[in-house]
Image (spheres, rainbow, N blue to C red):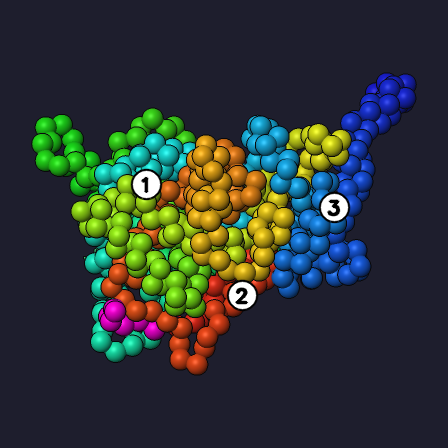
Amino acid sequence: MAQALELITGRLPVIAAAILVCAAAYLLPRLANLVRLYNIPVVGKEIGGEEKRRNAYLAGARKLYNDGYKKFKDTAFRISTSRTSSVIVLPPKYLPELSKLPDTVLSMTAAVDESMETKYLKIDTYIPVVPHLITRQLTPALIRLNPMISREVSELLKIEIPPSDDWKEYNAHDKLLRIITQVSGRLFVGPELSRNETYIDTAINYTMDVMKGQRAVQKMRPWKRPFMVSKMPEIKNLYKRIDEADAFLAPLVTLRKKMTSEGFEGERPDDMLQWLIDAQEKFDDPVSRDTAKVQLGLTFAAIHTTTLTAMNAFYNLAASQEFVGVLRQEIEQVLADNDGLFTSRALQAMKKLDSFLKETLRMNPATMAAFQRKVLQPFSLTNGQQIPAGVTVEVPAVAVNFDPTIFPEPERFDPLRFTKVVEQAAGSEGTKFAALNQFVSVNQNSLTFGYGRHACPGRFFAANEIKMLIGHTVLHYDIKLVDGVSDRYPNLEFAHMSIPDPSKNLLFRKRTT
Ligand code: HEM
Ligand SMILES: *[C@@H]1O[C@H](CO)[C@@H](O)[C@H](O)[C@H]1NC(C)=O
Ligand SMILES: *[C@@H]1O[C@H](CO)[C@@H](O)[C@H](O)[C@H]1NC(C)=O
């Protein structure tokens, strides 16, 4: 005993030094990180301290993003948000250099996991097979599937909004959500389930359930979360939803596997479910192999994003009656040249429709900040600013969209803004401009679909779906805002979100002119 004590005291300086070294190794990078962080200026100082700035952000962050963008121009700035980590806003001019950084430095998944509290929800945000299937299968398949998608859109429009001689009022959100869920479902799970109410309910409500779970977790004090979360009704509900999805997809998967196994001679189903069954073996992560989770992940990424964009477009259309006529003319003309079908070629030729939708995205971006990434390792911008690990970075998309040096008269909704830009650029410039100014274009001035290697892979499908939805609507219906209202329904803004008001109705009737 005494010997042991002696041994320890004898070595005390060594142990103390070791502890010091360990502490320094632990603290110094953190200290360095803090120094880097506090070297970055803050937007909204005039509002007051951290808490006040956070509340200003939650009430609607548009002004903060605009102020920071103007004030700091070429440098990074900090913004107080509802995130647990600090957030640094970066000027879009750094996007090309940022997109070169590997996922081990800038992580999209880690950013999503943090904001969604996925650790507690036990849902999976990284499902490798999903972007793979969208990019390798869905997008190239659009050329052959467009006529089918168009038929689906047309049929579902008639079912959900039966053409009537009198004006009839419908809740825009409910109707568009149901149509988009079923059209997308036709490509995701196939014709067996896409119009089944159980499927529709799951595809729609899963996202809501995730959001409810996320809010419930965020309301709970962090130290309680590890013990209490799984007992919360919102979380139990989410797990129940996943089990249900599993239960009703399983028989179809079994059937498909049996049907398409050896000796199968019929027509192979042409949808995500089948492509998934065929590709699954190549993926060894457990989530890619879990058909229900893949399907739920898909609906999470696809359904509400597309619906919100379509709602914004419908509200803009209903508020600009003269433009309805312009669109009809273009669409009829193009269809006449394409055997009456919404083929890929026809969609390409509907330039005014594309410009209208792009202007919709510019005026009404669903989120004010784009390219949200968690910083896993510190790095420097080419202007010398150091970005510490542990923060989240993002780009102020909303400020870019309303920058008058990029988009003259940015407050004006000009549906033909992007066709004019292309027409005004002559010759080879024209081709370059055309590529930069499409609805699906992703670049420093078009950030609604993100940027870089994780930019939305589903945007080509979403674009076609929304175009067909608008196309069939103007061909077969008159549409307007409810009586007594002449201005577009304003979006609801909170924190970094701007969403079309889901409580509003639109009037539809069978086309008269
Ligand atoms: C108009 C509708 C849509 C909008 C506004 C939208 C927006 C976005 C955004 C902002 C991102 C993040 C990109 C980044 O941070 O760089 C994203 C990613 C993603 N989106 Fe979309 N999206 C839409 C439709 C869809 C559809 C229809 C699908 C599926 C068919 C889809 C599948 C995905 C997937 C899988 C990712 C993750 C990509 C990755 O992990 O690399 N999205 N989307
Ligand atoms: C799904 O959501 C809708 C709208 O919020 C709700 O009316 C419906 O009851 C939900 N269904 C289930 C099974 O939770
Ligand atoms: C919807 O799908 C479920 C699960 O496969 C099935 O039990 C139900 O009968 C289907 N409903 C209709 C109307 O086909």
Determine whether 217 is above or below 158 in the image. Answer: above
Q: Disc 3 marks which amino acid?
A: Phe
Residue 113 lies in magenta, yes or no?
no
Residue 279, horizontal then vertical, whole percent: 30, 30
Camera-side residue: 95 or 424?
424
Instruction: Tell me which secondary structure the magenta stretch mostly adopts.
Output: strand
Q: Bounds of the magenta span?
A: 506-513
Q: Residue at x 54, y 49 (%)?
A: 116
Give the secondary structure at mark 3: helix
Q: Which residue is mark 3?
A: 72
Toward the bottom, the furthest residue is 484
What residue would you read off at disc 2? 492
For the residues labelled 1 and 2, the Cα–Cα distance comes to 35 Å
Disc 1 residue type (three-letter): Thr
Q: Residues within 10 Å of mark 3 (few under 14, many from 20)?
A: some
Q: Is residue 231 visible?
A: no
Indicate the position of residue 495 as horizontal and vertical percent values: 61, 58
Residue 295 lies in what quarter of the image?
top left
Q: Quadrant of the C terminus?
A: bottom left
